[in-house]
């Protein structure tokens, strides 16, 4: 997920708030059945980037595209 809440400007140590920091990126690995997924795991681990993230996606054909620079969607 991409944090888009301009009111949240810094992490407070509570993942459900921290993952919404404006300009951050949230990635999670592990158990996801409670979210409608099919992965079975003993854990679910969340990661949140700094709010000035740069994101470049790479498509199957090898094409790359930057979608976020310094925490701003472009």
Image (cartoon, rainbow, N blue to C red):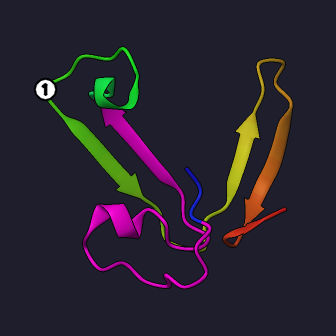
Estimate the x, y position of residue 43 in percent, counting from the top left: 17, 33
The answer to if 11 sits in the magenta stretch is yes
Compared to 46, does 13 lie above or below?
below
Main secondary structure found in the magenta portion = loop
Estimate the x, y position of residue 29 in percent, counting from the top left: 34, 35
Estimate the x, y position of residue 74 in percent, counting from the top left: 85, 62
Q: Nearer the viewer, residue 33 or 15?
A: 33
Find the residue positioned furthest to the left: 42
72 sits left or right of 42 in the view: right
Q: Residue at x 20, y 22 (%)?
A: 41
33 sits left or right of 6 in the view: left
Compared to 69, does 56 lie above or below?
above
54 sits left or right of 32 in the view: right
Report which quarter residue 7 is drawn in: bottom right
Q: Nearer the viewer, residue 35 or 13?
A: 35
Estimate the x, y position of residue 64 in percent, counting from the top left: 82, 38
Q: Nearer the viewer, residue 73 or 33?
A: 33
**Which span of residues is magenta-colored?**
4-30
Q: Residue at x 47, y 53 (%)?
A: 26
Compared to 56, does 8 lie above or below?
below
Secondary structure at numbered mark 1: loop
Compared to 21, does 39 lie above or below?
above
Q: Residue at x 26, y 43 (%)?
A: 45
- Identify the residue position indicated by label 1 in the image: 42
């Amino acid at each position: 997920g991409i944090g888009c809440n301009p009111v949240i400007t810094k992490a407070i140590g509570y993942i459900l708030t921290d993952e919404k920091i404006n300009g951050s990126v949230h990635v999670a690995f592990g158990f996801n059945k409670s979210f409608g997924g099919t992965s079975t795991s003993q854990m679910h681990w969340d990661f949140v980037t700094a709010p000035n993230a740069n994101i470049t996606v790479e498509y199957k054909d090898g094409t790359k595209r930057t979608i976020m620079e310094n925490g701003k969607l472009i």
